[in-house]
Image (spheres, rainbow, N blue to C red):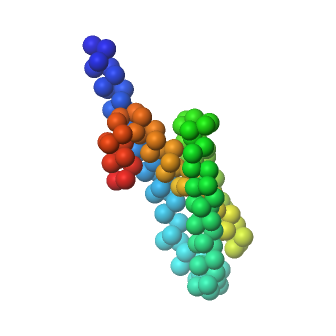
Amino acid sequence: MSAMNGTVRRLYDGVALSYGMTMVVLGSMIPSGLYSIYQRDWGLGSSSTVVFFSFCVIGVVIALLFGHVSDTVGRKPVILTCIVLSLASSATFTLTTNFPGLCIACTLSGLSVGLCTGAFTAALQEAISPALGTLLSTI
């Protein structure tokens, strides 16, 4: 009975972590479809789109510099930080009315995805198994 509970718990953890990672990554991609609307409605040129999109990359690079922070601080606090950053990014994309706001939203999005990849992958490997955890995070 105890082994069954452990298997069910690992399955539940794997599903929950996979879902969380998927939501953070998808949340970072959804605003991409809005870039042409920002260009049209705000009169931004295509070079402006390149600039604020680069802020996503900057956020990811900054987060990757701290890639092992979940080894020190713990998986759960870093995962929760990813989710908060993702929500803050979505709220900023929703509420912003100017170019600097888009840059802030993109930076928050990049930070959430950059932290997410390391923390969620490690948590999946620990919750399920190294091979299956890596496979799920890759998918």
Q: Is residue 73 left or right of residue 4?
A: right
Up the image or down, 5 lies above or below 20; here it is: above
Q: How many marks?
A: 0
Residue at 64%, 81% (x, y): give it. 48
Depth check, front residue: 48 or 127: 127
Quarter of image, res 4: top left
Residue at 58%, 60% (x, y): give it. 60
Residue 110 spot, x, y in % from top left = 58, 60
Up the image or down, 7 lies above or below 23; here it is: above
Q: Is residue 83 left or right of residue 95?
A: left
Quadrant where the image shows the N terminus: top left
Quarter of image, res 38: bottom right
Up the image or down, 42 lies above or below 133; here it is: below
Does any portion of residue 126 appear in the rendered image?
Answer: yes
Residue at 57%, 55% (x, y): give it. 64
Q: Is residue 15 left or right of residue 75?
A: left
Residue 96 spot, x, y in % from top left = 68, 65
Up the image or down, 4 lies above or below 75; here it is: above
Residue at 53%, 79% (x, y): give it. 36
Residue 88 spot, x, y in % from top left = 63, 53
Does any portion of residue 41 appear in the rendered image?
Answer: no
Residue 131 spot, x, y in % from top left = 32, 42
Depth check, front residue: 23 or 96: 23
Depth check, front residue: 10 or 92: 10
